[in-house]
Structures are given as structure tokens and as C-alpha cells.
Image: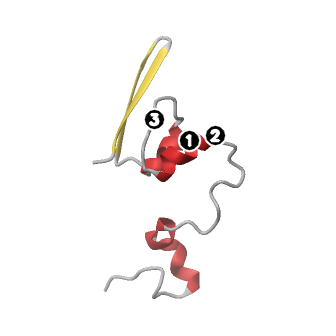
Amino acid sequence: MHTTGTNVPAAQRKRHAFDAAFLTEDTRTGLDWPADIWAAIEAVRVDVGMTAAQTRMSWGEPRACVEEGGVGRRSQQTKNV
């Protein structure tokens, strides 16, 4: 049997990913990002110059993340497909 957050007692809902799939409050509260960033997020688009947090807000959490670095440099690649 598969359960979701809609058919289990409230005390058990935190264990299910179902509730994490929906936002229950306004995400703009407390985030002072420019209007063009919010437009990109609403269009599920990532633009040059967006931060990692803004990218995640637009595309969601990556399925894989590879970090590389060296002296004085660091890069990160994420995959969502």
C-alpha cells in the first residue's frame, strides 16, 4: 500500500514527500529579489546571473550535483533530467 500526505494521520505526514511538493506560504515573503528574477522563476527559466537559490526556486532541486574545485576556483554542475 502506498500512502500520501492526504490519507495518513497528521502526525505521520512529515514522513511523506507529498507535503513537500506544495508551497503553503508566499515564497516572495522575505526574498527581496528583482522583478526580472521572479519573472524567470514563474516562467521556469534560469537566466545568467541567477544565484543557486534562485535557480533551485525556478527548476527545483537537482537530481545530481558534481562539484569541482582547485586553488582559487570552484564550479558546480547540476542535472535535472
Q: Earlier in the sequence, mark 3 or mark 2?
A: 2
Tell me where residue 38 appears, x and y as whole percent. 57, 47
User: Amino acid under label 2?
Assistant: Pro
Q: Is residue 44 left or right of residue 24?
A: left
What is the secondary structure assignment of the residue under circle 1?
Answer: helix
Q: Give residue 20's mark.
A: none
Q: Position of residue 37 (x, y in %)?
A: 56, 41
The image shows residue 65, relative to residue 23, as above or below, that is: above
Mark 2, residue position: 34
Tell me the residue that label 1 is attached to: 37
Residue 18 coordinates in the image, percent (x, y): 45, 72
Q: Residues within 10 Å of mark 1 (few under 14, many from 20)?
A: some
Q: Is residue 27 above or below residue 40?
A: below
Residue situated in front as seen by the camera: 57 or 43: 43
Outermost residue toward the left in this view: 81
Q: Mark 1 touching mark 2, by CB under 8 A?
A: yes
Amino acid at circle 3: Asp
Which residue, given by chain and number where applicable, does mark 3 sit on? 47
Residue drawn 52% across the image and 34% down it: 50
- The reply to whether dot 3 and dot 2 touch (C-beta < 8 Å) is no
Name the residue nearer the viewer: 22 or 44. Answer: 44
